Amino acid sequence: MSETIAFKPETLTQVHKITARYPAERKKSALIPVLHLAQKEFGGWLQVPVMDYVAELLEITPIEVYEVATFYSMFNMKPVGKYVLEVCQTGPCMLKGSDEIIQYIKEKLNINAGETSADGLFTLKTVECLGACGYAPMMQLGKFYHEHLTKEKVDEILELCRQGTLALD
Amino acid sequence: MSKKLLLKDAHVEGIRTFEVYRKQGGYEAVEKAFKMTPDEITEEVKTSGLRGRGGAGFPTGMKWSFLAKPEGVPRYLVVNADESEPGTFKDRYLMEHIPHLLIEGMIISAFALGAHTGYIYIRGEFAWIPDILEQAIEEAKAAGFLGKNVLGTGFDLEIYVHRGAGAYICGEETALLESLEGKRGNPRLKPPFPAVKGLWESPTVVNNVETIAAVVPIINITGAEYAKIGVGRSTGTKLISACGNINKPGVYEIDMTITVEEFIYSDEYCGGIPNGKRLKACIPGGSSVPIVPANLLLKTINGEPRYMNYESLSDGGFATGTMMGSGGFIVLDEDQSVVKHTMTLAHFYAHESCGQCTPCREGTPWLYKILKKIHSGQGTLNDIDLLWDVQRKIEGNTICPLGDAAAWPVAAAIRHFRDEFEWYIDNPESQTRNYGLAHYADPIPVPAKAE
Ligand SMILES: Cc1cc2nc3c(=O)[nH]c(=O)nc-3n(C[C@H](O)[C@H](O)[C@H](O)COP(=O)(O)O)c2cc1C
Ligand code: SF4
Ligand code: FES
């Protein structure tokens, strides 16, 4: 299958830049950064053929990629919507009302945590502390944080997503 | 009093750029350090009394002096920017606002350690910060402070940013090194310590972002002057990230002589508690340190004021005290439920356990389940004893301190708020009212506002 999967040339250039950060015989160190690139380029999650392709690129065995991909919470092991709303639910955010925000999103999108909306646009993920506790409640969407969330702010964000104008990276 | 060494220029317009940073006196410490020998720099750091700002508070100069220096083997400097301890967001602030301070600190530290490569391991979710750091690295390189033959001294140094991908455990230094090697973040058995066998089996120093940044003012003002700031073994300044039920959440730099009361209530810092509510409890050093009720937070058991420093916060041990930890200061007002808060933390640790040790892998979800049972009104008095028993069996029986970090918050919650647990058990029908609070809050006066 891996013949159908290949990074764009400009991504490959990035991969080479990444591997150059480590000693030549330590190419495996590039694994996590390269998996980030792969997840972004191949549909927001890591399919087995994608992981096999990364293994080939870094000259390691596929199992070495699988065991890493499944360990880290940022790697998705199943398909996700175009917009993944990752809302923090840990203590400090809870003190500031993250429960209500999560509940509000669930009702608005008619999904539970871990699910994707019927139109394939949104996935809701509850996550653990993202290092933004002082600006709670908060969520991550793509590359950026959205902090001091209120219901109104959530409405705005969802609307921008629907219009396709929210910056993801 | 606020004494600013790290954040003094944080609000200067354009401080993220090399040009402005340099104009504010940036990189002068590098120039000064290159006139010293590596050993002299390490001595200076020892004299300063600087202790690791990642949580454990280990003396930095001493850590550096343990670094093995076999001939022909590379040494590495690794900066721990994993910052995932709930309540902690200070390193993020530093990197976002004054990235050059970290780069400058790394240059001096790498020179002192004889490391020619430095990695900044940053948590994956801080996805926009690597761009900021890489920009700073580029600028420093263009100005001759990085790369081959730094400032014509013959010293070579490259710094790279390495993103993680979501795993609290990768903040533990040996898990971090595993992760940097492209593996799962499973902590290693120690010894050997990273100073002997670290990244790719080479001698490695792992330090927190704030620790490395603090090296800059130490070189600028000298270790002896740095040591005069603060009190006792709590020298220099500390970044505190304050959150929860306070008027002014944010990152504050303090010299460690102020009282906890001043920190919470003065307008210079947290600005008090919103809506005239009373203080119930606080976790002053990140989620892993014991929670303390308001009366023990503001005063030690002997009735002395408690201060914002390593010694005073831990006064009384775990029976009546807590810890400075990472400086993640979480405030709970009278409306908050300690049981619920502790439950979210238990969920956190269960989620973040790497799974290598049975007590941690099995015990952490168990803690969460019992807490959930109690919180949802299904608990029995036996569950409180079971909770106590399970946390006791995790503590001290694991490869890395995550097990302890999961056990301590639960132990402290039971120790100080047993009545609240019992209240949940006795009042299964009303989970949203006062949590048996009167018992704890009544003896706590609302301190007069500091002027
Ligand atoms: C579970 C766990 C998580 C940790 N997370 C961090 C972290 O996010 N950042 C950090 O600097 N240190 C963290 N530490 C402490 C590191 O292991 C190590 O002590 C620290 O990076 C050393 O740097 P310092 O001496 O400058 O504090 C963690 C430790 C444990 C056990
Ligand atoms: S204590 Fe927990 S996190 Fe640490 S090594 Fe053991 S299982 Fe992993
Ligand atoms: S608890 Fe939500 S960002 Fe820290």
Image (cartoon, rainbow, N blue to C red):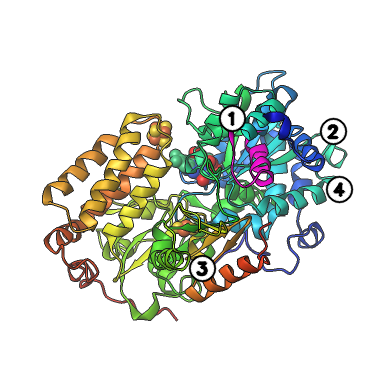
In front of the other: label 1 or label 3?
Answer: 1
First to last magenta residue range: A31-48
The amino acid at mark 4 is Ala
Tag 2: amino acid: Gly
**Residue B373: x and y, percent?**
22, 52
Q: Position of residue A43 (x, y in %)?
A: 64, 46
The chain to which mark 1 is attached is A
Residue bearing the label numbered 1: A65
Q: Residues within 10 Å of mark 3 (few under 14, many from 20)?
A: some
| Mark nearer the viewer, 3 or 2 | 2
Residue topped by disc 4:
B142
Q: Chain of mark 2?
A: B
The residue lying at 70 percent from left, 18 percent from top is: B71
Of labels 2 and 1, the one closer to you: 1
Please report whichever mark, 2 or 4, sits nearer to the chain's N-terminal start: 4
Q: Is residue B17 above or below residue B73?
A: below
In this rendering, do the residues under marks 3 and 4 share a single chain? yes
Q: CA distance from mark 3 to mark 2?
A: 42 Å
Which residue does the numbered mark 3 point to in the structure image?
Answer: B1
Q: Is residue A38 magenta?
A: yes
- Considering the numbered disc 2 on the image, is that residue within a helix, a strand or a loop? loop
Where is mark 2, residue-wise? B154
Say if the magenta span includes residue B341. Answer: no
- Residue B441 appears anywhere in the view: yes
